[in-house]
Structures are given as structure tokens and as C-alpha cells.
Image (cartoon, rainbow, N blue to C red):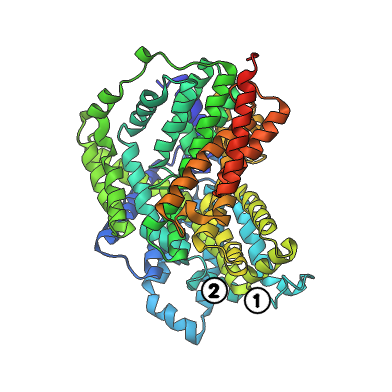
Amino acid sequence: MKSKTAVDAQDVLEKYDKENQFRLNIGKWAWVVTFLAVGLTIFHLYTGYFGVLPSQKQGAVHLGTALGIVFLLYPVKKTWRKTQKTVPWYDVVLAFTALYVTYHKLFFYESILQSRISGYSAVDITLSLIGVALVLEATRRTVGLPIVIVAGVAIAYAIYGEVIPSRVLSHAGFSIDRIATSLWYRETGVFGTPIQISAKFIFLFLFFGVLLVNTPIGKFFNDLAFSLTGRFTGGTAKAAVVASALQGTVSGSSVGNTVATGSFTIPMMKKAGFKPEFAAATEASASTGGQIMPPMMGAAAFIMMEYLGVNYSTIMLAAIIPAILYFAGIFIGTHFEAKRLRILGVPKADLPVFKTIMLRNGYMLVPLFVIITTIMTGSTPQRAALYGILAAFLVSLVRKESRMNVRKIIHVLEQGGRVALPVIAAVATAGIIAGVVSMTGLGSKFAAGIIALSNGHLLLALFFTMIACIILGMGLPTTANYVVTATIAAPALINEFGIAPIAAHMFVFYFGIVADITPPVCLAAYAGAGIARANPFKTGVTAVKLAIAAFIIPYIFIYNPILVFVDVTPLKLLFGVLTALLGMVGVSSAVIGYFIRHSKLWERFVLFGAGFMLIVPEILSSGIGLTVMGLIWFIQHRRTVY
């Protein structure tokens, strides 16, 4: 029998995480789903080791099998997931139609390539129209309606470009046939870079995460976090931050991380004395940071690698300092809130012992070290993922309770296919949007619009780009959001303002992620609020306050990209990190309203300004910021009132 907490956690997942809204009863079709999902996982393991097929063939198997599973698992309406006793006939038809129209690219690969020159037949056009429509419907079922609306608007823009009154955005327009065939048969649409990266790298890393989830690594991370931080002021909240950061190394889902870690940490934070909204916000903001935490990060990081033409180790290096600063900001914020409320740590006798934990379960970190070492030595992400998968499987054999028999292995292989479904659907639809951008030249038009609005000022251009990323992030998954903004916004920052490419791409990546905690649509915050039984909107506002670093740091690494390892020297990097950490202290204390005493309103403004000046990695501004913070410390130290 499940505990109340477990039931609540599952309910929260089903409510806020679309990928958990699948049918509970599929009757005799269960074996078909198992066959397809297991086959999909084995296919990726095989091609990961022996070499992938040509991109169109690899993408056809990857997307086609996923679409077939989606229509068998996900109902038309989420409210039908519990009432339907089997898969209705029309979804069976859609499933096998999806399999055919995508596998058609595999079976008739040569003739389709020839059709690019000779022209597409009526059959080709019909199949492309059906294929695009099925991708959009599968995405609606697994990810949600907003991204489908964006894709629909993009297609309408491609068709009716000539009727748009704006001279900047208008274009000649394309026929429906040409749009469908371009999106379905060429490398700039559905089967473009996003789906190719999903088929090469992302699936394997998602399966790696599934394998680790089937070990007790989640409990190990929680115990490790509490052993390290539990005894300090506000220890339960600090442990939640550390546990979420560790969890983020193997999972890139904001909502999933919030529920997995939060079902344990949020009740403990409430019991310690934190308000429900603060407890939920701490978990949500920390869990959202999992998408920027190497080595796994979010799926978008692998697409960034391809867009920039760099090794994944370069992406990891660029992400590590901003990720540390992000979590440091939340960690410091929980410290000041605990000091403000006078919340102490957990008694040492009630905490796990670090040495005991590491001696008993430290081996669970081996798969992570394997992946990091393999990537940093220059191997491909596929090879790193495969070695990580092998290490994770071996780790599962160490303890009797985590060893897998044949039934469990089949279950894990099936879960590997299931977990990837929302990502595959999202990147396919993102490919539709990117394909329209490529066809219509929208990227250059958007760049012209940004330049016109900003009047050539970089700060304004960054601000407008940030707003666009956050708005898109409210309806699009992080991966799809990144694909869109990397296609239309990042090039504007790079080409028109001379921004370092990796800094520009990390900028749009970050602001797509923080949409998960930015009201009014902040799914991670809503999930945390569901567990804490807190006000969702207040939770979102509190999460933004805690994660304020995420709204400042991207601007800093645009202006001074040493934080993303561009033109970096050891001394510059050390100086930049130290001053940024001190800046986080100033900013976080200002937001919370406590430094070494309760801060007056003017002190909070001064602390925020001083913290911001410290975050900017320049000697003069950092010196001024440190001096001002020292003065506030002296003033509050002389004040006798707590």
C-alpha cells in the first residue's frame, strides 16, 4: 500500500507533467507497446555501438516507432486515461499509420532522394501531409497544446506570408504541398538537426537516467545531501538544494526532479519551520537548475553541441560555473531565510553519517564518473552514454535489491522507450518550427526586428530576447524552446552584436529553463506547491526570488564571457567566481531581507546594488561592491536589535 506522500507525489506528476498522463489500461495492446518500446531501446543501443544509419533512416525508426507508441499510450483527452479499458480503434489506426508514413522514408529512401530532383509524387505529398499532422497530434498528447499552437502559427505564416502588412515580416508565401514536403523530406524540418541529435545522443542519455533510477541512487543523493548540510542553519532547505543539484546530474526534468526529491524534502522543510510556499519554491528552483547541471543537463545541451559544432565537453565546461552560481544563490537564500526565521539545523545524531554513506553506497557515483571521464577524454557522446549505461547496469548488480532479472530488464528497456516519447515528439515539432524559419527567412527578419526595437543597444536586445525566451518557455518544453530561440534569436546576438557564440546560446538556453519557475505558468513551482499544499502563484514568486541569480548571470557572461570559459585565464576565472559568489550573498540577502540582522528597506536596495556590482567580473565595480557590503555589515553589526 502506498503512503499518503507517495500518492500525492504521483497525483502531482500526473497533473503537471504531461508525460505521466498516459492510459492506465491498454488491454491486449500492452504487449505491442512493450515490443515497440523494447525494440526502440535495443535499436539505439545497437546503432550507438555499431554506428548510426544515415540521418533520414535513423530518424525514421526513431520518430516512427515513438509515434506508434504515443497513439497507443496517450488518449485524445487526458480525462479518458482512467476510464478507457483498452486502446480505441481509431488510435490503433493512427498508431500504425504513423509507423507506415515514417518507415516509408526508410523503405523508399533512394527514390525519395531522387524525388528531390524530379519532383514529389501525389503519394509523397499525401504521406508528408499525414506525417506532419500526426507529429503535431502526438506532440499535443504528450507535451501539450501550446507548442502545437506555435507550430500551427508558423505553418500559417509560411502559407500566408504575403498578407502580413509588416514589410519586415512579410514574404511571398508557399503552397501547402511545398511546405509539407520540405518539412517531411528535407533535413531542415521534422527530420532536421533536433531529431537527429535526439536519435544519436539524447535517447541513450535518457536511458542512462532510467537505469540509474532503478538503483537506490535517489535515496543515496538525499542521504548524502543531509549528511553534508543537515546540521547547519536551515539544514533541511540546504539539503534540498544539494539533493536537487545531485539529482539534476542524472535527470533533466524540472517537474520530475521537483516531485522525486520534493516528496521527501518539502515535508521536512515544513516541519523545520519554513513556510509551505518557501519550502516548495526552494525545491522547485533547485530542481529547475538540474537542466543546467553537468554532466547530463537538459536534452537541449546536445542540440547546442551540434549547432555550435563543438564537443560536449565544451558545453559542460561552459555550463559548470553558471550552474554553481545558480545553486549557490539558492543555497545562500535558504541560509538567510533560515537566519531570519531562526531555524536551526537537524541534530547531528539524527543525520546520516557521510563516511558510512560513502563506504556503503559511494559506488553509485561510478556511472557519473565514467560518463564525465569518457567525455573529457574526447570520446563521442554516444560512446560516453554506452559506457555509462554499462557502468549503471553493473552498479545495479552490487545490491540484491537492485539486481535485475529478465522481467526487470525488459521493464527497464520498455521504460527507456517510454521516457523518450515526449522529448522525441517535442523535438520533431520544434523541427517544424525551425523548418519554417529556414524556409521563410524568419531568422534574419527577427534579427532585424530585435535591432529595430533595441535601436542597436545590446542591453535592450538582450532584454527583448529574454522576454521572448520566457514567453516561449511558458508553452514549449525547454528543448523545443531552445531550438526556436537558437534558430531566430541567438544568431541576431552573434551576428549583429558580436557576442561569443557559446555565450549567446547559453543565454537563450538559460531563460528558456527559468520559465519553469516564472509566473504565471511555472510548472515546477506548481508541482512543488502541490506537494507542499501551498499557494502556487506565491510559490512561483518566491522561486523567482530564490533563483534571482538565473536572471542576472546570463547578462554577465554576455558582457564578460569568462564565466563560460571564453578568453579565460586561471586568475581571471578565480577572480570572476569569487566575486560572483560574494555578489550572490549581497543579492540573496537583499531579496530575503536579512544580512546579519533584519535589513531596512534602504539597506536591501544598497545590498542588491552592491551584490550586482560584485557579480560583474571587473576590479573597479567589484571593489566598490565589496566596500559597500562591508559598510552595511558594519552598520548592522552595531545594531543591537535582531
Q: Amino acid at mark 1?
A: Phe
Residue 490 location, x and y as percent? 57, 62
Please say if 109 is above or below 616: below
Q: Residue at label 1?
A: 174
- Residue displayed at 40% across by 57% down: 314
Instruction: Report whether residue 450 is seen.
Output: yes
Quadrant in which the C terminus is drawn = top right
Residue 190 location, x and y as percent? 50, 65
Q: Residue at label 2?
A: 182
Is 411 left or right of 64, judged from the image as shown? left
Q: Amino acid at mark 2?
A: Ser
Most foreground residue, 242 or 425: 242
Q: Report which quarter residue 547 is drawn in.
A: top right
Residue 602 location, x and y as percent? 72, 30
Is 174 left or right of 81, judged from the image as shown? right
- Residue displayed at 56% across by 56% down: 558
- Category of crowding for the residue at label 1, using alpha-carbon neighbours closer than 10 angstroms: few (below 14), some (14–19), many (at least 20): some
Farthest residue, direction right:
165
Please say if 554 is above or below 611: below
Residues at circles 2 and 1 in contact by the CB criterion of under 8 Å: yes
Please say if 307 is above or below 329: below
Instruction: Report whether residue 82 is seen.
Output: no
Farthest residue, direction bottom:
118
How many marks on residues? 2
